[in-house]
Amino acid sequence: MNLDVDIIKLRADGDYRLSKVRGECMISVRIPGGIMPAYLLSTAQEIAEKWGNGIIHLTTRQKLAMPGIRYEDIPAVNKALKPFIKDITQDICGVEVEDLEAGYQSIGGRTSKKTPRVGKQFLNWVTEEVIHDVIENLFEFEKDMLKGTPKYLHMGHLIDKGGYMKFKERVLRGVTLNSEAKVAERMYWAEDEYVANMYVK
């Protein structure tokens, strides 16, 4: 059997992670806030036992991860994920999902060792209201950079693509900062905190 797979597509079009075991991957089921309806545990159990290796990991990123999924079983697993996607992603979180049986659709990713400067904060001493508004704008920035196409890219790559100044302008657009708030003048490395003017009074 040919085991060649498009890693980028596999991660973007379903939120799967490749395994060290040849021909296997892991699906991560999203549980926002770490709270889910109890009846969905039986769905996770079915996926883990029928297509996985019978194990479910409770992750620190508010997910249920089920390893041991064979590549050829991904379409069946995507269909089995429908209760999670409908009841949590669509009904509870209010996200419109075009095809409930197509699996998860990723729109971005976290920072990584490849872009360590993004791991440093660009905002400091802000209120919850500011954070809420910035997060909403952050999704719009992702849409602008990805041009509406789901693709697995770290946020650092998106910021590199658009430039920090464009990123800062977009995510702060329409946001009223509290008087104590500090904004980095540019993206910076850990050793350049003062250059970014984050902590200078």
Image: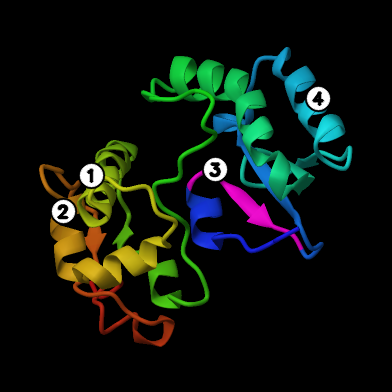
The Cα–Cα distance between marks 3 and 1, rounded to whole angstroms, is: 21 Å
Q: What element carries label 4?
A: helix
Residues tagged 3 and 4 counted as in contact (Cβ below 8 A): no
Residue 154 in the image: state x and y as whole percent. Answer: 43, 62
Quick one: 196 or 199, which is closer to the camera? Answer: 196
Give the amino acid at mark 2.
Arg
Disc 3 versus disc 1: nearer the observer? 3
Quick one: 137 or 157, which is closer to the camera? Answer: 157
**Pointer 4: residues within 10 angstroms few (<14), some, or many (20+)?**
some
Disc 3 versus disc 2: nearer the observer? 3
Q: Earlier in the sequence, mark 3 or mark 2?
A: 3
Q: What element carries label 3?
A: loop
The Cα–Cα distance between marks 4 and 1, rounded to whole angstroms, is: 36 Å
**Pointer 3: residues within 10 angstroms few (<14), some, or many (20+)?**
many
Residue 185 in the figure: left or right of residue 132: left
* Residue with the mark numbered 4: 46
Give the amino acid at mark 4.
Glu
Residues tagged 1 and 2 counted as in contact (Cβ below 8 A): yes
Where is 29 relative to 96, above or below? below
Give the amino acid at mark 3.
Gly
Q: In which quarter of the image is the C terminus?
A: bottom left
Give the residue drawn at x 30%, y 82%.
Answer: 194
Give the residue drawn at x 34%, y 38%.
Answer: 128
Name the mark on residue 14: 3
As for residue 70 lying within the magenta part, the answer is: no
* Residue with the mark numbered 2: 170
Give the residue drawn at x 21%, y 61%.
Answer: 167
Q: What stretch is highlighted in magenta?
A: 13-19
Q: What element carries label 1?
A: helix
Q: Earlier in the sequence, mark 2 or mark 4?
A: 4
* Residue with the mark numbered 1: 140
